Image (spheres, rainbow, N blue to C red):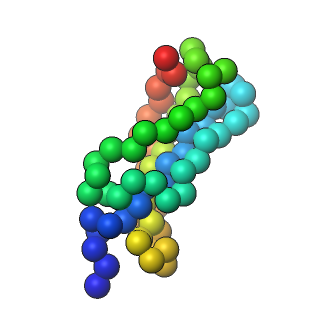
Amino acid sequence: MLSLYADKALIAIVNFAKNQAVTITAGAARSDGVQNVDVPVEWIGDEVHTYMGFISENGMEIANSVYLGNITIV
């Protein structure tokens, strides 16, 4: 049985104005509770949209992503 605490974060940050995205496909473990993401400095002041899902530790199971909302990069 796989531990949900060992799942890895899947992150997508989409900048529609610049037609660009930053993704993380094997981020921090779910148990860490936090994931830092570096975005291009050119995005400062832009509104971006954020999505998150999880992938199992063995990479065999992937949860549906959810829309987390929009933020402005500062």
Q: Is residue 23 above or below residue 36?
A: below
- Residue 65 visible? The answer is no
Q: Which residue is drawn at the image coordinates 62% and 22% (left, top)?
A: 41
Q: Is residue 60 above or below residue 42?
A: below
Q: Which residue is drawn at the image coordinates 41% and 71% (left, top)?
A: 56
Residue, far bottom: 1
**Residue 34's spot in the image, x, y percent?**
33, 44
**Residue 13 quadrant:** top right
Q: Is residue 48 above or below residue 27?
A: above
Q: Which residue is drawn at the image coordinates 44% and 34% (left, top)?
A: 69
Q: Position of 7 compared to 20: left or right?
A: left
Q: Which residue is drawn at the image coordinates 73% and 34% (left, top)?
A: 19
Residue, far right: 19
Q: Position of 49 compared to 35: left or right?
A: right
Q: Position of 35 compared to 4: left or right?
A: right
**Residue 8's spot in the image, x, y percent?**
41, 61
- Residue 28 visible? The answer is yes
Quadrant into which the N terminus falls: bottom left
**Residue 57's spot in the image, x, y percent?**
41, 72
Q: Exactly how many numbered labels are in the figure?
A: 0
**Residue 38's spot in the image, x, y percent?**
53, 35
Q: As rendered, which of 8 and 19 lies closer to the eye?
A: 8
Q: As rendered, which of 46 and 30 lies closer to the eye?
A: 30
